[in-house]
């Protein structure tokens, strides 16, 4: 495997991890806001219990992803920084606001409702801004004036593909978080929250698939190359759909004397579904980072520097992975924390 291909694979893997963690993080914030004053279900308590320790981990992976982009593809930063300045700046601003409110949420009961609403709203706006970057990479929205790249905001904001991408991102976020929190509620033996999240997962699953298919149909004419590559990779996308159907079926399977649905198997299948879909889409997007102005090779650093950085990354993850395992055991598997004993 060429160094540039290995680099973009690592970067895409980090993007996948952040996409899953971000969906859980932002989705939990939204569900916590929606059910904040509903005393008939423990959905808000379950969502906030998961959200409380995990938002820091999500931000860690965001930092790692951004640093990886700069380190692996330094020659792409000029173009990316110019055309993505506004959405990225807004994301950073909202992340700062959200993080600040998350910190004070444990110390300011007087503003608890305000903090919950802020977390829930930013849990929708931030993913929408992040997903809005995807259509920019398809082509047709970047022009050059005096050799300086500019994002064509009018064309972007008036094109239906932007809003379909956002709809796809939000439906995916809420679906993944609903399935995961369903399993989380099961671990905590909170069956009212379990049934609440299962109900949402059942209707969000088909919606996310339908929106994904409709999104491809709204690609700009300049993105015909992506559509052709997606058609060539139909087998991978078919496997992704198969994993979805299996995971969705687990929402209905009932074991004897148990609640309907096998949440853990549903979570595993849905994560596999999006893993296959993300890598299939990434493969279809090659060799461009931004069509037609920037390819993977154009933005890549030298192979010698890349392999040196790879050693540093290996050492760093050698430290981080045991910490993440410990975190998982403390906050996502410890029944004393799950049940707040």
Image (cartoon, helix red, strand yellow):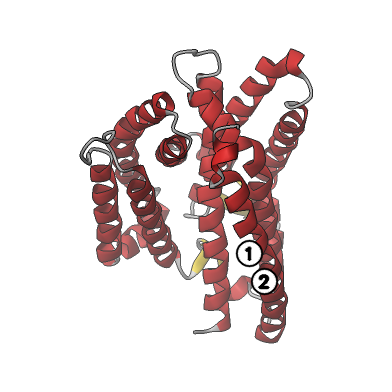
The percent coordinates of residue 285 (x first, y second) are 44, 63
Circles 2, 1 touching at the beta carbon (< 8 Å): yes
Residue 92 in the image, given as x and y percentages of width and height: 72, 41
Element class at badge 2: helix
Q: Position of residue 65 (x, y in %)?
A: 64, 59
Horizontally, residue 188 falls left or right of residue 93, namely: left
Q: Residue furthest bottom?
A: 304
Residue designated by label 2 = 318
Point 70% across, 68% down: residue: 319
Residue picked out by circle 1 = 321
Q: How many marks?
A: 2
**Mark 2 to mark 1 CA distance (whole Å):** 6 Å
Residue 48 circle label: none
Label 1 residue SS: helix
- Report the residue at 78% width, 20% height from top: 108
In the rendered view, would you say 138 is above or below 45? Answer: below
Q: Quadrant of residue 74?
A: bottom right
Viewer can see residue 84? no
């Amino acid at each position: 495997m060429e160094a540039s291909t290995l680099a973009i694979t690592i970067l895409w893997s980090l993007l996948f991890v952040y996409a899953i963690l971000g969906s859980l993080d932002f989705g939990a914030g939204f569900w916590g806001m929606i059910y904040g004053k509903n005393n008939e279900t423990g959905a808000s308590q379950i969502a906030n219990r998961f959200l409380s320790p995990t938002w820091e981990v999500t931000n860690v992976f965001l930092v790692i992803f951004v640093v990886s982009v700069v380190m692996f593809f330094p020659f792409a930063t000029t173009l990316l920084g110019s055309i993505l300045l506004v959405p990225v700046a807004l994301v950073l601003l909202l992340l700062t606001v959200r993080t600040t409110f998350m910190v004070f949420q444990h110390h300011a009961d007087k503003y608890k409702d305000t903090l919950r609403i802020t977390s829930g709203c930013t849990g929708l706006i931030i993913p929408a801004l992040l997903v809005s970057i995807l259509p920019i990479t398809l082509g047709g929205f970047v022009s050059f004036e005096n050799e300086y790249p500019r994002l064509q905001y009018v064309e972007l904001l008036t094109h239906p593909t932007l809003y379909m991408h956002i709809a796809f991102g939000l439906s995916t976020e809420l679906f993944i978080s609903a399935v995961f929190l369903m399993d989380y509620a099961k671990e905590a033996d909170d069956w009212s929250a379990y049934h609440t999240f299962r109900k949402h997962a059942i209707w969000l699953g088909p919606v996310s698939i339908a929106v994904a298919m409709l999104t491809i149909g709204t690609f700009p004419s300049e993105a015909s190359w992506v559509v052709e590559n997606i058609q060539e990779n139909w087998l991978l996308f078919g496997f992704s759909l198969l994993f979805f159907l299996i995971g969705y079926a687990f929402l209905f399977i009932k074991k004897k004397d148990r609640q309907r649905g096998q949440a853990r198997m549903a979570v595993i299948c849905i994560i596999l579904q999006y893993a296959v879909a993300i890598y299939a889409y990434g493969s279809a997007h090659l060799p461009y980072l931004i069509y037609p102005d920037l390819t993977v090779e154009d933005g890549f650093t030298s192979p010698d520097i890349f392999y040196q950085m790879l050693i540093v990354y290996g050492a760093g993850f050698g430290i981080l992975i045991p910490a993440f395992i410990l975190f998982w055991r403390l906050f996502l598997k410890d029944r004393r924390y799950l049940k707040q004993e």
